[in-house]
Every structure is written in structure tokens, then in C-alpha cells.
Image (cartoon, rainbow, N blue to C red):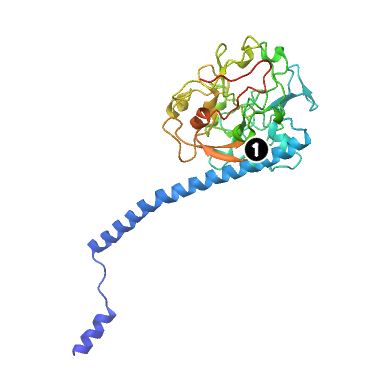
């Protein structure tokens, strides 16, 4: 009889009590709460690594370009007429961007200019044409807000990166275009002091609206480079800097080197690349792990010798890593120590 009872008990094991189930659920929830931050951190680190790898490919493509151009860097952008010819009188039809110079001949893929941390891989070009991508609320130079636009920039469809304006000149080749006594000039790599210590390309701020013209008109300025300097006399307008034989450019002052907080930037209407209120360096990204209280994050930087480093934008300013001269500007362009 006892054997029969034992067999019955073996075939009908006791189930979990409510308390035991709650304990198991609590343990699982605790493990998830411990693992999720680690998984999120690993994902962010992986994205940062991918961005750096893409930027490294851009550096390799740039090296190939420089070999063919005898060391002369491309302009950040130039104006084109309807026939695709570069014009210098301001009668532009669309833009020729430096990214086109690298992927049009196959040195780099168009995807190399993207970063998975930035929404949609990067910021849209100004004039996307009939097939390009654009952001909600964006308009092009003709005020078009849809794919029926006819003007299409020669530029990667999505741009996560921006050039150093001290090396990548704009199209301001004449005083008529620059609006001041100084103009842009092309730069040869032999002019740059310490290529390995000078930033060539940086990641954009992840918020595309910060690089628009601001206000109600959201025109993307992803073709623009970042001017890291201020002039003692003309501030953020490098073209008005006088006299021509005086450098007077600085990195801004310690401790924050004109960097604004994330909250201040998010509350702005954009226009970081045209603003007299904010330093253009605020258009540089801060969206990777690490950093400092002022920067709020890190970003990848491509240096003139082709290597890539991830650090805070504040550190690059402290270390004078944007150059010792405003190479892409006419006249005396020495950068003064703060």
C-alpha cells in the first residue's frame, strides 16, 4: 500500500506556489535590469566602432584622391550651373560636394559617409532631386518639400560627416561671394603643420535641424564645413577679418571653448553653421559613449594622416587639433594661443 501511494505522488508532482512564482519573476526582472544596460552599452560601442570604420574608409579614399590631385584637397562645396560646370559668379543651380569627389570614381562607397548612431545614417543633402531622401519638414533651395524637385546635389545621399573649414574651403573664391576682404583658397597637404595631429573630418551633431538655416525654413546645410575658429576682430565671420596681414584667430576661451550644453542646442532653432550666437564647433557630434561634462559625449575624428580617433570635441579644442592656421583662407591666418 505504501508503494502505491509513492507511485501516485511521483506521477503528480506539486506545482509552484504563488510566492515561488513571484520570486522567480522577480529574479528574472532583476537579471534583465542588470543585462539591458550592458547590452545597450555594447550596442552603442558597436555603433561608434562602425562609424569610426566608415570614417577610416573615407580617409583611405581621400588619400587616393590626393594622389591624383597632387596633394590638393577638394573644396567642401562648389556651385554648379545646369550643365554641371563649376561657376564662381554665384549663379548656382546645385552643389558639388567633397563626398562626390571620393565616391564618384569608386574610391569609397556612398554608405561610407553614414553612421548608424545618427538617425537615417546621416543628414540629407540640401537639394535631393527627384529620387533622393529628405527629412520631414525639410525644403530645398527652391522651397520644394517633396521628390518633385529637379535640382540634385552631387553629394552622398546621407552625410554623417563634415570637413574642417580650415582645410576644406567653401566656394567663396571672390570678394563678391565672400562679402569681405578675405576669400577661400585651395589647400595642399604640404601646407599643414603636423598632419597626424590635425583634424580633417568630424562627425556631425546627430540632430539634423541644428545644421539647417533655422526658423521656419528647414534647409539642410550638410554640404557646409565647420569653422573651428573665432577672430579677435570679426568673431565668427572669417571673411571680414582685417587687416589681411594679421592672423588673430583663436580657439575660443577656456574652460568650455564656446561649447554649449546639449539642452541649449536642442532648444535653439538651428543655424549652427550660420549663427553669430554659437560657435560652429557645436555642430560637431557628441553622440558616442564617454566624453566630459561640457561635451556630453564623444565623436570620431579623421586626421590628416588617415588615422581615426574617438574623443570629445572639447579635448580637440584644448589640444589645438583643428590646425595652427586657417589654411583655406587668404591673408595671414595664424592661430593665436589663448
- Badge 1: residue crowd in 10 Å (few <14, some 14–19, many ≥20): some
Which residue does the image show at 59% across and 40% down from the upper left?
308
Which residue does the image show at 63% across and 25% down from the upper left?
166
Query: Residue 117 location, x and y as percent?
Result: 53, 41
Q: Can residue 248 be seen in this view?
A: yes
Query: Residue 72 location, x and y as percent?
Result: 74, 30
Tell whether 313 sits left or right of 127.
left
Mark 1 element type: loop
Q: Of residues 245 and 90, which is closer to you in this image? A: 245
Quadrant placement of the N terminus: bottom left
Residue, far bottom? 1
Q: Of residues 246 and 278, which is closer to you in this image? A: 246
Q: Of residues 172 and 32, which is closer to you in this image? A: 172
The total of numbered circles placed on residues is 1
Query: Residue 276 location, x and y as percent?
Result: 53, 16
Query: Residue 112 location, x and y as percent?
Result: 64, 42
Q: In which quarter of the image is residue 95?
A: top right
Check the image and report above or below for 244 versus 228: above
Residue, far left? 1
Q: Of residues 278 and 80, which is closer to you in this image? A: 278
Q: Can residue 129 be seen in this view?
A: no
Tell whether 79 sits left or right of 204.
right
Residue that numbered label 1 is attached to: 305
Which residue does the image show at 27% across and 62% down from the upper left?
21
Amino acid at each position: 500500500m505504501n508503494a502505491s501511494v509513492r507511485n501516485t505522488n511521483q506521477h503528480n508532482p506539486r506545482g509552484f506556489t504563488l510566492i515561488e512564482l513571484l520570486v522567480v519573476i522577480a529574479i528574472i526582472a532583476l537579471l534583465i535590469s542588470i543585462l539591458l544596460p550592458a547590452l545597450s552599452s555594447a550596442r552603442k560601442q558597436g555603433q561608434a566602432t562602425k562609424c569610426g570604420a566608415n570614417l577610416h574608409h573615407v580617409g583611405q579614399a581621400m588619400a587616393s584622391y590626393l594622389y591624383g590631385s597632387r596633394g590638393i584637397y577638394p573644396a567642401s562645396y562648389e556651385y554648379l550651373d545646369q550643365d554641371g560646370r563649376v561657376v564662381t559668379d554665384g549663379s548656382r543651380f546645385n552643389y558639388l560636394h567633397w563626398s562626390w569627389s571620393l565616391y564618384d570614381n569608386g574610391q569609397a562607397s556612398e554608405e561610407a559617409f553614414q553612421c548608424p548612431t545618427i538617425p537615417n545614417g546621416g543628414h540629407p543633402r540640401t537639394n535631393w532631386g527627384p529620387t533622393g531622401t529628405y527629412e520631414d519638414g525639410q525644403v530645398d533651395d527652391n522651397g520644394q518639400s517633396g521628390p518633385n524637385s529637379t535640382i540634385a546635389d552631387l553629394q552622398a545621399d546621407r552625410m554623417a560627416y563634415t570637413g574642417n573649414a580650415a582645410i576644406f574651403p567653401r566656394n567663396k573664391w571672390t570678394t563678391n561671394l565672400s562679402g569681405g576682404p578675405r576669400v577661400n583658397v585651395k589647400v595642399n597637404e604640404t601646407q599643414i603643420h603636423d598632419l597626424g595631429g590635425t583634424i580633417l573630418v568630424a562627425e556631425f551633431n546627430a540632430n539634423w535641424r541644428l545644421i539647417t538655416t533655422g526658423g521656419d525654413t528647414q534647409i539642410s546645410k550638410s554640404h557646409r564645413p565647420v569653422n573651428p575658429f573665432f577672430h579677435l576682430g570679426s568673431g565668427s565671420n572669417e571673411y571680414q577679418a582685417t587687416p589681411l596681414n594679421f592672423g588673430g584667430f583663436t580657439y575660443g576661451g577656456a574652460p568650455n571653448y564656446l561649447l554649449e550644453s546639449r539642452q541649449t542646442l536642442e532648444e535653439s532653432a538651428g543655424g549652427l553653421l550660420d549663427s553669430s550666437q554659437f560657435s560652429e564647433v557645436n555642430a560637431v557630434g557628441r553622440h558616442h559613449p564617454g566624453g566630459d561634462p561640457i561635451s556630453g559625449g564623444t565623436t570620431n575624428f579623421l586626421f590628416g594622416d588617415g588615422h581615426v580617433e574617438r574623443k570629445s570635441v572639447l579635448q580637440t579644442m584644448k589640444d589645438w587639433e583643428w590646425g595652427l592656421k586657417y589654411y583655406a583662407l587668404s591673408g595671414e591666418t595664424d592661430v593665436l594661443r589663448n
